[in-house]
Amino acid sequence: MTRVAAVGDIHLGPESHGVLRPAFETLPGCADVLLLAGDLTRHGTPEEALVVAQELKELAVPVVAVLGNHDHHGGCPDEVTAVLEDYGVRVLEGRSTVVTSGGTRVGIAGTKGFGGGFAGRCAGEFGEPVMKEFVRYSRRCADGLRAGLRELAAAECDVRIALTHFSPVPDTLAGEPLEIYPFLGSYLLAEAIDAEGAELAVHGHAHSGTEHGMTSGGVQVRNVAQPVIRRAFHVYNLPARETYREAERL
């Protein structure tokens, strides 16, 4: 059983030193890995990223993150990423990573993702160039997630997790105004997850949304935005893929 701690939308700023550190220091007793689902900062500055990094410094569990829209606001996501990585955080964008816990290989594929909406009510690559680029950017993010999950399948991971900031499904947006659903996620992310397979999909971004959802292919989706889970992190217990295969044979 793999214990996955996850949280998003912590939005730390200059005065946030020490806010989450006491909770994070309890992680070794309850989790094997910490996933951060974007919007780690308020305005996407390196100074705010340093506050986040210091909260995560020398934790006894691996930390894997994606950035969110707030982390891009300052126009220097590469600098934000560099600060976090200097402190040992693995920041993913169209990439994957593998952590090992008790002999179990846990693979995480990540992308920020983007908007565009969901099946039947989504934007298309038609019309003005700016609209086409909007949808193409969302598609590129989803393609990166798909490639990352495919890498994890080739690596024969025991557990595969899709980590995004934007939501792959509308289920976990329940509670948000319907008018802003297209700006909270995209069905393209769910298509990538279902095409390549995963045991869990984790996202943030929807502060007024709902924790539990599922892709049409049956992959569990969890909205871990901190205003939704209302704690420093939530822990999910995932059986290894071998357990699923045994269940299928039974």
Image (tube, grey):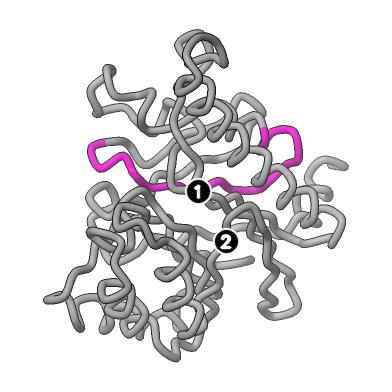
Helix or strand or loop: what does disc 2 sit on? loop
Q: Which residue is drawn at 29% across and 67% down?
A: 45
Q: In this view, does 129 lie above or below 57?
A: above
* Numbered mark located on residue 164 in the image: 1
Helix or strand or loop: what does disc 1 sit on? strand
Name the residue furthest bottom. Answer: 58
248 falls in the magenta region: no
The N terminus is located in which quarter? bottom right
Of the pair 90 and 230, the residue shown nearer to us = 90
* Numbered mark located on residue 209 in the image: none
- Residue 34 position within the rendered picture, expressed as x and y whole percent measured from the top left: 48, 70
The C terminus is located in which quarter? top right
Q: Is residue 104 above or below residue 224?
A: below
Tag 2 residue:
92
Q: Give me the C-alpha separation between circle 2 and circle 1.
A: 9 Å
Q: Is residue 122 above or below residue 61?
A: above
- Residue 248 position within the rendered picture, expressed as x and y whole percent measured from the top left: 82, 40
- Residue 131 position within the rendered picture, expressed as x and y whole percent measured from the top left: 46, 20
Residue type (three-letter) at the residue carrying disc 2: Leu
Residue type (three-letter) at the residue carrying disc 1: Thr
Of the pair 250 and 216, the residue shown nearer to us = 216
Left or right position of 34 against 215: left
At label 2, counting other C-alpha atoms closer than 10 Å, the crowd grade (few under 14, some 14-19, many 20 or more) is many
Q: Nearer the viewer, mark 2 or mark 1?
A: 2
Say whether marks 2 and 1 touch (CB < 8 Å). no
Of the pair 133 and 89, the residue shown nearer to us = 133
Q: In this view, does 131 lie above or below 45?
A: above
Q: Residue at x 58, y 29 (%)?
A: 136
Left or right position of 118 against 211: right
Q: Residue at x 78, y 62 (%)?
A: 157
Magenta stretch, residue numbers: 192-208
